Amino acid sequence: MHFRKGCMAEAGLTASALITGTAVAAIFIFLFLFALPVFTGGQGLAILSGEWSPFKGQYGILPMLAASLCVALSALAIGWPLALGLCCGIRGFLPRPLGRALLVMLRGMTAFPTVVYGFAAFFLLVPIMREALGRGSGLNWATASLVLALVILPTMALVMDAGMRQTEKSLRLTGAALGFTREQTLAHLVLPACRKSLFAAAALGFGRAVGDTLIPLMLAGNAPQWPAMASDSIRTLTAHIGLVLATDSNSAAYGSVFVAGCLLLLVNVAVQLSLRFCLKTGKTE
Amino acid sequence: MVVCLTLALTVTASLSWASPLDAFKGKQGTVDIAGGTAHIPVMKEAAKRIMTANPEVRISIAGGGSGVGVQQVGEGLVHIGNTGRGLSSEEVAKYGLVSFAFAIDGVAVVINPANGIDALTAAQVKDIYAGKIANWKELGGEDRAITLYTRDEASGTREVFFKKLLAKGDIAASANVVPSNGAMKTAIAQDPGAIGYVGIGHIDSTVKAPSMDGMVPTQENAANGTYTITRKLFMNTKGEPQGVVKDFIEYIFTPEGAEIIRASGYIPVSK
């Protein structure tokens, strides 16, 4: 009986793994097949040029790729240290009840729909940014990054916290034996040991930031230009897909949506793979 | 006054024997509608009246923009696909679509209500959108940078603005892009330096519509031809419409349909 149960569970798991794998592969193939005519068609590699102005027949989406990377990386640069700080507070130097309350708050924050952040920021943050930066509409790279940082913060903090809690459990006695305080255990033992989950949190945060559509669509201004300054209105690949998807499906602009989707997937895969590679080489040192 | 009028209309509608809603008597079926967002108020009111008269007829209405309208009706996902622009010959050829123009909508430039400017010329708007005029000071306003707002690639409103007002002139790459008439209004109402454009039916106290080359952007002026930056609103079907879908389209062209179109801020067009 036990044997059969194990067998069935194994078969079930294999099946679901196969289905998931096939689905992911199918998405890749689908996007690639739809993007292909754009390259083989009349305009060739023009899609990867640097200017988007459909009325002039230019359909370059590279500025959007740059914008996606800029927004996601700057959101990560703001959000990741904040998440780390919060976790250190929760596991280290803050009073335990306060830490617990913060954890509850973080869990609650993951449940907020992104549109709420976008909507609130549109009325509260955008006018402040417009005046503070002194130029532009307030719908720009900086505004979108700030709000995205807030969106990815709880997910990153919870991943970090889960990692820290595990390591802390196994290292508590070691710390006590060395006569370390809670803070010292955290700084000298726990943090170096849970490097992996800190990286994992960053990768997850980046993935969410680069894939988020609503925040850039509502707050980044969507101008299809190269990002140069924090006050520049920019358009991410995700927002581009959202804006162009409703055009005439025979147009060249419509084809760019599939190329944008491909680029987005490639960026995410590249980040995840390079992170794995980094962590592996780190281990063998 | 308005209440009295509506009341009188409902009473006459329900008392008169030859109400256009009689066409739906004893019929059942569904009408799925998607596409242009400018059409929604008209579609909604018509659907409400038809479904109140005959609950057996089910009508669903979704937005999505002109592009979505064409695509969904073409793929057979909805019965009526709305567009705020004429169909391209490729679209007609690919899907075999039939178009019904039922209303005229004007497109007007809008600015923040706090902006002192009351009149603009098409030449000025062209220079503003090309990035040649970058401060309201140059137009006699206060010293404030102009922030440009435009609509997305799928927008019918954008197409009218681009062809009729900008005469296919440049739109600076730095212009902010918003995805709907509503989003445009919200953005303009928030930003004291803003300039954008919306369908005339969407103009209210949150934004200000300056006169354009001396033409005042109102629905009346769009109807009598004194305001020329206009477009038509279309319903499109795959092949000739049948059954309740046909009845729905015919209802839009009745005097009652015309009244709904006027109440939604557009000018009715006869079939």
Image (tube, helix red, strand yellow):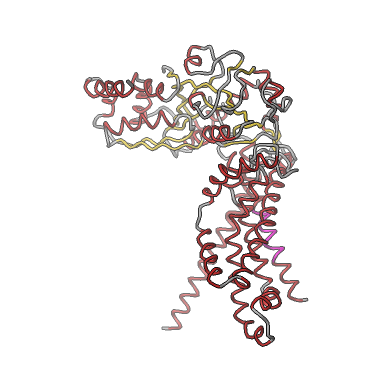
Magenta span main SS: helix
Specify the quadrant that holds the C terminus of chain A: bottom right
Asked if residue B195 is positioned above or below residue B56 in the image, the reply reads above
Give the percent coordinates (x, y) of residue B269.
Answer: 43, 18
Asked if residue B263 is positioned above or below residue A284 in the image, the reply reads above
Q: In this orientation, does residue B170 appear?
A: yes
Give the percent coordinates (x, y) of residue B202.
Answer: 49, 27
Residue at image position (62%, 61%) is A204
Spot the residue most to the front.
Answer: A95
Q: Which region shows up in magenta?
A: A265-275
Residue at image position (73%, 41%) is A226
- Decide which of A40, A143 is in the foreground and name it: A143
Asked if residue B246 is positioned above or below residue A284 in the image, the reply reads above
Residue at image position (65%, 45%) is A236
- Decide which of B244, B262 is in the foreground and name it: B262
Specify the quadrant that holds the N terminus of chain A: bottom left
